[in-house]
């Protein structure tokens, strides 16, 4: 190979990071969702501030209640919603969920415009949060399943998932900053108005798509039996089962650290709102960077090893973070933990989406939503109670140790899991058919190519 061929081509690599944009449907989805996600993050910050402002002496407890109300429905309804997504047209489901989300944001705007300080207004917000949680129970499996239909080449799917994750975290940096400006200028209600309008963009993008018509086999099973079929598949296929179990445990233990962050900032770092903003931004930068790293990868091969390393990095980062009381060091560590959490989540998503059977995709992604977001509110409740007993720093320390042990346990299972995944990837053409050609490679643990 000549010198010219050996030189890396940064432009080619940069273009490869956005190869999913070659698909018109994905470009439309990415653009529309980019607008909508900024509004979503504005609503999240505005909701918390509204509850804090109107909750009075019970504000801290009510914040936890509203957070639980928004996420708990995903845990209880996710698998059922996934069963319906496998029976319905996913594109149509997503259009409906966006319209309902528009109505929910409009409802929040009405409450903020007309409500008065007091717990009654907060309970209205909590009720609307439950409604959004129910919507998200259907939205997540439909959204994740539809990604496969937006890209014409299956090898572009990992890139599409990674770019989607980078979009979520990029908007996470922009949305709250805009919300702070809007709240200071005209109040929380206008954040909800902006969010409601932003859903028009993603609805327009969805309606403009030209998706290939797919003939779905008629489902003769009842909803309950259809769901049970998905349960047996998810629990009976060891790689999917192990990945979802790891994701659920990590989300349960690691996600609550963001809930405890205000307490940690006040008690350990002795800081205020500016410190909290710095740490939140640091975590977002780490997550965004991790998503870009995944977008730069050209293959799913090696992602099992990436999941393991990301989990270990996340656990180790939380352990060190719990023992540090210097702001800049804490921010640097949250860049690491943010990257670890995002890479672990997105790589898990990619692996599952790649290997799952198409007719069961909605149900499996329902369990994915249950593991990723559904376990977090229970971890938050436990972490909040333990923080009163043992202190926030000790809770974060315990979470880090738990995540680290989970990662080490998963690492020991990789040799067994690769034997189950190999036939699937051979069938898909991701791996060659002869094992001799890939003695040193694996599906869930292979060196970077």
Image (spheres, grey):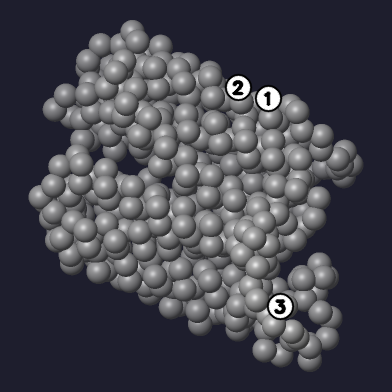
Per the rendering, the mark at residue 4 is 3
Label 2 vs label 3, nearer the camera:
3
Q: How crowded is mark 2: few (under 14 residues within 10 Å), some or many (20 or more)?
A: some
> Residue at the location (62% across, 32% down)?
32
Return the residue at label 1.
Answer: 204
- Of residues 324 and 227, which is closer to you in this image? 324
Q: Is mark 1 on a helix, strand or loop?
A: helix
Q: Where is residue 84 in the image (x, y as percent from the top left)?
A: 69, 38
Is 218 positioned to the left or the right of 145 in the image? right
Label 3, label 1: how far apart the Cα atoms are: 46 Å
> Residue at the location (18% across, 64% down)?
324
Q: Position of residue 435 (x, y in %)?
A: 78, 87
Label 2, label 1: how far apart the Cα atoms are: 6 Å
Q: Do the residues labelled 3 and 1 touch (CB within 8 Å)?
A: no
Q: Position of residue 137 (x, y in %)?
A: 56, 38
Quarter holding residue 102: top right
Label 3 vs label 1, nearer the camera:
3
Q: Where is residue 42 in the image (x, y as percent from the top left)?
A: 40, 30
Label 2, label 3: how far apart the Cα atoms are: 49 Å
> Residue at the location (41% across, 28% down)?
43
395 in relation to 119, above or below:
below
Regarding residue 412, the answer to whether it shows in the image is yes
Q: Do the residues labelled 2 and 1 touch (CB within 8 Å)?
A: yes
Regarding residue 381, the answer to whether it shows in the image is no
């Amino acid at each position: 190979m000549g010198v010219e061929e050996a030189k890396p081509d940064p432009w080619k690599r940069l273009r490869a990071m956005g190869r999913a944009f070659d698909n018109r449907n994905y470009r439309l989805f990415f653009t529309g969702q980019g607008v909508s996600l900024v509004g979503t993050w504005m609503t999240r910050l505005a909701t918390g501030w509204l509850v804090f402002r109107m909750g009075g002496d019970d504000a801290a407890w009510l914040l936890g209640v509203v957070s639980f109300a928004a996420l708990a429905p995903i845990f209880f309804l996710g698998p059922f919603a996934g069963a319906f997504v496998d029976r319905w047209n996913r594109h149509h489901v997503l259009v409906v969920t966006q319209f309902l989300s528009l109505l929910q944001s409009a409802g929040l705007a009405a409450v903020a415009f007309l409500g008065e300080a007091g717990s009654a207004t907060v309970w209205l917000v909590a009720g609307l949060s439950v409604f959004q949680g129910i919507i998200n129970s259907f939205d997540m499996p439909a959204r994740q399943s539809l990604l496969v239909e937006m890209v014409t080449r299956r090898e572009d799917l990992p890139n599409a998932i990674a770019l989607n994750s980078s979009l979520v975290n990029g908007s996470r940096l922009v949305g709250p900053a805009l919300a702070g400006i809007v709240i200071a200028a005209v109040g929380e209600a206008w954040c909800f108005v902006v969010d409601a309008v932003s859903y028009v963009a993603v609805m327009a993008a969805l309606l403009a798509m030209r998706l290939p018509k797919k003939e779905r086999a008629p489902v003769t099973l009842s909803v309950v039996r259809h769901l049970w079929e998905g349960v047996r598949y998810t629990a009976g296929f060891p790689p999917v089962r192990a990945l979802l179990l790891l994701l659920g445990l990590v989300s349960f233990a690691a996600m609550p650290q963001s809930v405890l962050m205000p307490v940690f900032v006040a008690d350990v770092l002795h800081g205020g709102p500016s410190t909290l903003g710095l740490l939140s931004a640091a975590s977002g930068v780490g997550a965004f960077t991790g998503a870009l790293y995944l977008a730069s990868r050209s293959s799913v091969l090696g992602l099992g090893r990436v999941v393991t390393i990301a989990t270990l990095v996340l656990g180790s980062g939380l352990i060190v973070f719990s023992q540090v009381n210097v702001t800049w060091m804490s921010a640097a560590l949250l860049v690491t933990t943010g990257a670890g959490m995002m890479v672990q989540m997105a790589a898990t998503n990619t692996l599952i989406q790649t290997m799952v059977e198409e007719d069961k995709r909605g149900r499996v992604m329902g369990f994915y939503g249950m593991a990723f977001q559904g376990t977090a509110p229970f971890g938050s409740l436990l972490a909040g109670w333990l923080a009163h007993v043992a202190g926030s720093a000790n809770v974060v320390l315990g979470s880090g140790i738990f995540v680290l042990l989970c990662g080490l346990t998963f690492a020991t299972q990789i040799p067994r899991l690769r034997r189950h995944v190999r036939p699937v990837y051979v069938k898909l053409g991701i791996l060659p058919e002869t094992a001799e050609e890939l003695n040193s490679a694996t599906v869930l643990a292979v060196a970077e190519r």
